[in-house]
Structures are given as structure tokens and as C-alpha cells.
Amino acid sequence: MRLLPAAAAAALVLGVAAPLALTSPASAATVVVTDATGDAGGAKRLDVTRVKVANDDRRVVVRTTFAADRSGVLVVSLDPRGDTGLRLVARKNGSGDVSAEVVEGAFTDREPTEAPLECDGLRLRWADDVARLTMPSTCLHDGDYGAVRFSVLTEGAGGGDSDEAPQTAQGEIGSSVWIPRG
């Protein structure tokens, strides 16, 4: 079989471009952590099953999946390498109303506070069993940071810790691997 020059060129372009189209440009800046179902201390608590964090150039996106649609509090601790961090706090009440804020200090900081931080553009979408928080990069050290790691904690509607991800071998809250900025 003989290819015409145009067909050969098209085959070459498709042969090189097709695999590249399947690769996400932000794949190096994304980490996924899974957590066991049923470890939240009760059926009515927020039970984390999966957390995906993307550390993109202009934003950090946290997508948390729960075992079921429940009310409660989701706290995402973001810790930049070599600097102080912050926490993204999302709340869902029994009637389904949601709110989000940014609070000073990551879990790994020596003395995290409860001081709220200004973060124009913080968005929360909580639909059924998935909460998605999007934070503009300017909310963390005015965008002057590189790699981050994260920890996730949930609390029941009445307070008290429910679930953590990732967890250490001893069952304590841990931290993800470092996520490069992409």
C-alpha cells in the first residue's frame, strides 16, 4: 500500500499528536488520596472516600468525594513548602445551604489561628456527595508559592472530628505528598 504525501503527513501528525492529546498538561500538578469507607465514626457523619487536589498556576482545586450526602464541615489544610499555610473551610447545613471561608494557618503550622483571610474568588460547589473548592492562587502568599501538600478533616454538624485523609499507619491525620505547581 502506497500513501500519498498528504496522507503520509497527516498520519505522522496524528501519530504524534494523538497521544499528546490524551495527556493532561496539569497531570504533574495533581494528587489523589483515597480513604476507606465507614471510618467516620457513624453513618450520619461526613465520610471522606477520595480527595483530588490540583495545584495549578492560577488556582488550587480540591474535589472531595464522600460516602454519602451529609451535612457537616470540610476542612482542607494547604501547606506550601517552607512557609505558613491556610485552611479552606466549607460548611453544609441540614437544609443544604453551603458556605466557605479561608482561615489562617495549616494543620502543620506551629500555631494555627482561626483568623479569617480575605480571598476574593473563593468558590464552593457542593452537590450531593461531592464538594469542590476552588481557591485563586493569589489567596496564598499573593500567589508566590510553589509545591503544596494537603490534609483533609471533616467534622460533624454538632462539632467533633469525623474523618481524616490521608491517615498515617497509626490512624492519625497525615499529609499528602508534595504537589508541584503546574
Image (cartoon, rainbow, N blue to C red):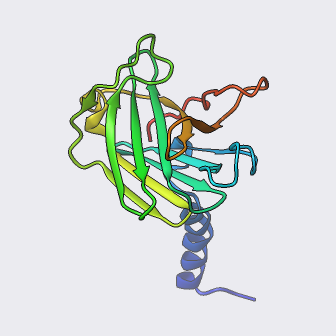
Q: Residue furthest top?
A: 110
- Against 122, residue 116 (above or below) is above
Residue at image location 39% in from the left, 16% down from the top? 83
100 left or right of 77? left
Locate residue 114: give its quadrant: top left
In the displayed image of the protein, which residue is found farthest to the front?
158
x, y percent for residue 74: 49, 44
Q: Is residue 36 left or right of residue 122?
A: right
Quadrant of the image containing the C terminus: top left
Q: Residue at x 59, y 50 (%)?
A: 46
In the depicted view, which residue is nearer to us: 19 or 156? Answer: 156
Q: Decide if residue 165 is on the left or right side of residue 132.
A: right
* Closer-to-camera residue (41/172): 41
Vertically, is 9 above or below 52?
below
Dividing the picture into quadrants, the one containing residue 124 is bottom left
What quarter of the picture does the N terminus occupy? Answer: bottom right
Q: Residue at x 27, y 31 (%)?
A: 116
| Residue 165, x across and y down, in percent | 64, 37
